[in-house]
Image (cartoon, grey):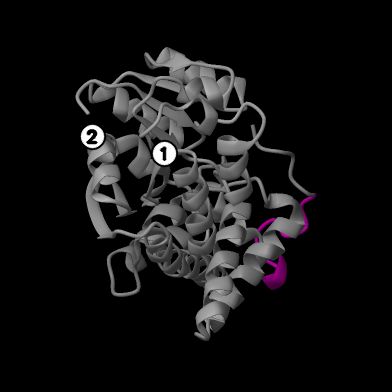
Amino acid sequence: MGASRVGFVGLGSMGLGMARNVLGAGLPVRGYDIAAGARNALAEAGGEAVESAAEAATDVDALVLMVVDADQVRDALFGPGGAAAAMRGGATVVLCSTISPKSVAEISSEVDAAGLSLLDAPVSGGKVGADAGTLTVMAAGSEEAFESARPVLEAVSGRIHRVGDEPGLGAAYKVVHQLAAGVHLVAAAELMTLGAKAGCDPKTLFEIVSGSAGSSWMFNDRVPRMLEGDLRPRSMVDIFVKDLGLVLDTGSEVRSPLPLAAAARQMLLAASAMGYGEFDDSAVLKAYEAAAGVGNADSPAPRKPD
């Protein structure tokens, strides 16, 4: 793809970091986000901020979608001011959002009908990985789509897995992955709450578990935020409510029991119901604190995060 232009729709906590790394790889980027602050941040990083998905998609070889859910993907591509009609024939849509395999397959058919290619390429690694360019990519699609997107994928990732030719398979891998991520997140909050009730010093408990058999990537990443009370959103509670919903839907479709995923989602739903839905997903701790009567369980509902 050389130094061809890359478009981005979705410049949130992960999309902005990804766009910066694509710029750092020497690829021109134009991007759109509904938030003016995100567009300004892209411009400050050397990208071209535009006012619609269609503008982001004009004259690009690859358009990266990093939005929240399938409805936003469809709106970005096919809604008013959508990207698909503005893209040149044969260009590649790089779908990095976490949505269901069924939705990816349906969207892929619509993209094909528009004379475009779709690479199903969800990513894992959170804001930390997006900023560092060390995301894990799970890519499925044609050889042509994969090769078209390769410079973008290499710029944002530390590891690329080509998992198949059919869009939807990448989403399947990501949804299954989210089971582990969500359960480990909620287990971390449960562990820290139990430790508080049992008289453990939280920092000492973190040091012990983080270096022992009970550790996980999610534990090491999220517990420091829990200890600091830093609830600025990197990945929101409601994002994990959505993702574990996708996990449960997939389990229903293939008849696989998922009791741990179901229980984890209930605790995230509880945190959302308390007003923490748009806060960092480490705020699931608040649901445990309320249930156990520890921490600031009686504090009023939080204000929206900045």
State the residue position of label 2. 151
Residue 273 appears in view: yes
Which of 1 and 123 lies nearest the eye of the viewer?
1
Name the residue located 72 percent from the left edge and 60 percent from the top edge.
297
Q: Residues within 10 Å of mark 2 (few under 14, many from 20)?
A: many
| Image quarter of the N terminus | top left
* Residue identified by numbered label 1: 116
**Residue 266 pos. (x, y %):** 66, 71
Q: Distance between the residues labelled 2 and 1?
A: 18 Å
Q: In which image quadrant can residue 287 be found?
A: bottom right
The image quadrant that residue 128 belongs to is top left
x, y percent for residue 284: 60, 60
Query: Is residue 233 highlighted in magenta?
Result: no
Name the outermost residue toward the left: 2
Q: Which mark is residue 71?
A: none
Number of residue marks = 2
